[in-house]
Amino acid sequence: MKTIAFLGSPRKDGNTELLLKEVIRGMKEKSAVDVTVFNLNLMDIKPCQDCGGCDKTGECVVDDDMTKIYPEIRTADRIILASPIFFFGLSAQSKTMIDRCQSFWCEKYLLKKPIPPGEFGRRGLLVLVGGMKKNVGIECGDASAKAFFRTISVPEHRVLSFLGVDAKGAILKHPTAMKEAFETGRDLVSG
C-alpha cells in the first residue's frame, strides 16, 4: 500500500510534524506500507497562475517541484495532509500545493478522467493542529482539504485535529494526541 504525506508546517519538529510522524508509525506497525513524506516548506512550488495551461490536457505547464508530486498523487492509495492552522485556514505551504492541483480538477471535471481507485481504494487523512480554541479553523481547513481530496479522487477522508496547542512540542503534553495519532495511522491502513 503506497502512502504519501504532505507536511505543510514551516516549523521543523513542530507539533504538526510530531503528529504526522506518529500517524506514520501507527501505519507501519499495522502494515507493510511505503510512505513518502513531502516537506512542502523545503520545496520550490510556485503558486497557481490560473494560466489555463492545464485546461485541455490536465497537466500543469509550470516546471517546479510539483512535477515530483503529481505522479505520486496519481499512484497513492493513502494521502495524508498535515498542516498547522494559521488565521483559521491551512498553511500557505499546504494551500500552494493544493492550488497547483488545479490540473487534476481539469482532468477530472473537464476531461472526465478521474484517477482510478486502485487495488486498495483511495483514502485520505487531514491532520490539523492550532493554538486557537475555536473550531472555525478546523472547519475552514477541512473545507479546503475536502475540495483537494475530492479533486484528486479521494472519496473519503478523516480529520484528526487538536486545538489549544501552540508552543513548539506542546502536543507531547496533550493527554491523548500521540495515542490518537498512532491509532489513526493504524486505522488508515486497515480494511
Image (cartoon, rainbow, N blue to C red):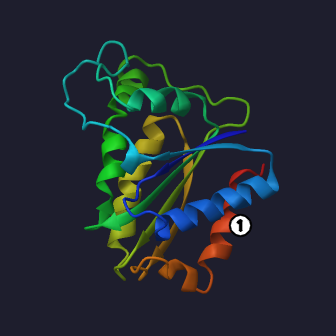
**Circle 1 Cα neighbour tier, 10 Å, few/some/many (<14 / 14–19 / ≥20):** some
- In the image, taking residue 143 as reference, residue 62 lies left or right, namely left
Q: Position of residue 117 (x, y in %)?
A: 63, 31
- Which of the image's four quarters has the N terminus? top right
Q: Residue at x 35, y 26 (%)?
A: 103
Quadrant hosting residue 19: bottom right
Q: Is residue 108 above or below residue 130?
A: above
- In the image, taking residue 37 as reference, residue 14 lies left or right, namely left
Q: Position of residue 46 (x, y in %)?
A: 26, 36
Q: Residue at x 49, y 77 (%)?
A: 169
Q: Is residue 139 above or below residue 62?
A: below
According to the picture, the residue beneath numbered tag 1 turns out to be: 183
Residues 124 and 171: in front is 171
Q: Residue at x 37, y 34 (%)?
A: 101
Residues 69 and 133: in front is 69
Quick one: SS at disc 1?
Answer: helix
Quadrant hosting residue 129: bottom left
Q: Is residue 134 above or below residue 72?
A: below
Q: Position of residue 86 (x, y in %)?
A: 30, 66
Residues 25 and 79: in front is 25
Q: How many marks?
A: 1
- In the image, taking residue 89 as reference, residue 24 lies left or right, namely right
Q: Is residue 149 above or below residue 76?
A: below
Q: Position of residue 51 (x, y in %)?
A: 19, 24
Q: Residue at x 35, y 20 (%)?
A: 110
- Of the residues shown, which amino acid type is indicated by label 1? Glu
